[in-house]
Image (cartoon, helix red, strand yellow):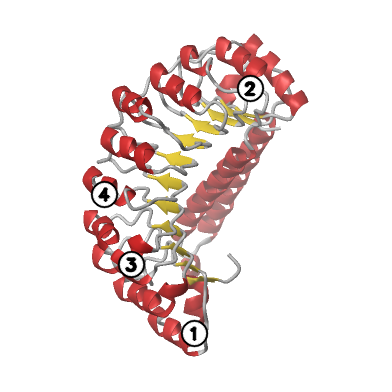
Amino acid sequence: FKDALSIYEICAICFKASEAFQELESKGGEFGWLDLSNCSIHVTDDVLIAALDCFGSNLIGLSISGNLGLTDQAAAEVGWKSKTLEYLDVSHCIQLSDSFLNALSESSDFKRGNKLKVLDLSCCYDINETAVIVLLQHMPILERISIAGCSKLGDAALKSIFKHLKNLRSLDMSGCVFITPQGMEDAFSGEISCELEDIRCTGCMYINDKSIKNVFTKFSTSLKVAHFGGLRNISDRAIEFAPRYLENLNVSGCFNVTDKSLIHIRNNCEAMKRLELGGCSGFSNKALAEYLQYASAKGIEVVLPAENISGLDMGLKLDPEATKSLKHKVAKWLFVVLAVGLATIKTDLMSVGQWIRLALFTGVLCILYIGVFIIALLLFH
């Protein structure tokens, strides 16, 4: 959005965010996007209410993600004071419950002018199915919804999503462990008008081959992204229905997926751009080598951990983000060890022996770091 305001900019203007909002409003400031995410120290109920009082009527996007101190009382004001919202992110606000959703459902102004297209409820652990089902009835143009980590949501919520959201494009239900194969079948049994492009159900432990087959066949012409990481009940019998337009597939940790799936993906998924296979022990080295050669020629990104490329001489590079993260963790660990070691030495009272001890300690750390760096170069070249 063109006019955006974050809590960091607000706090730079004034020590108290609520006073900053009033200062900005007095100068005629209007903002379409307000990002108050991950600022638990600064963003309290009073701050959110002050922000909505000043800018609520013009907001298009609002993110209050990760603010652990926000309660239903303040969040409920969104329904009454922000009638133009298209994007709402309340993920990881762990104190929010059904009262917040009920307030949105009961707000006549919000329902009448509802323009919401994106709703993120990830890791709002206390919301239940009844409140979600009622709310979805008032979301006619919602395109993206995330209920990832909402552990109380199950089959009824999933069925309601596909029943009421006619414009749905993206669904993240990762970690919703109470969604069952029967629930998936019921959700897809009726007429579905949406054209789903992105589905993520990583960690939904009960989902099986039939469930994934239903997803693939129901959205064969629209589905582009499918994340099924950690689904131990799926196998080649599901992947063989992967549609030709699929661009991004994650089957990491799916132990029953074998060479047959790689052959199907190569022969049928013409639009594939990224394939994640971490922890899939069912692939042979030969099949992996053949697919990696094909992927290299086609520009397909294949993500594999080190244990999957044992014996392969493909010049394969691991996921750059994973490599970068590992190096950062190693450097951080070495720094912590050095800091702890130095903290045990009182430099103002150090004897010659203690200085020698410090020099030896530092030398050992340097050797250790160089060794780790050499190993990283060999593994992640």
What whole-number distance in Å separates the C-alpha atoms at marks 3 and 1? 26 Å
Amino acid at circle 4: Val
Amino acid at circle 3: Asp
> In the rendered image, which residue does mark 1 sit on?
24
Label 1 environment density (alpha carbons within 10 Å; few <14, some 14–19, many ≥20): some
Label 3 environment density (alpha carbons within 10 Å; few <14, some 14–19, many ≥20): some
Pick the front one: 151 or 83: 83
> In the rendered image, which residue does mark 4 sit on?
134
What whole-number distance in Å separates the C-alpha atoms at marks 3 and 2? 46 Å
What whole-number distance in Å separates the C-alpha atoms at marks 4 and 3? 16 Å
What whole-number distance in Å separates the C-alpha atoms at marks 1 and 4? 36 Å
Nearer to us: label 3 or label 2: 3
Q: Quadrant of the C terminus?
A: top right
What whole-number distance in Å separates the C-alpha atoms at marks 2 and 1? 52 Å
> In the rendered image, which residue does mark 2 sit on?
269
Vertical arrangement, residue 298 with respect to residue 121, above or below: above
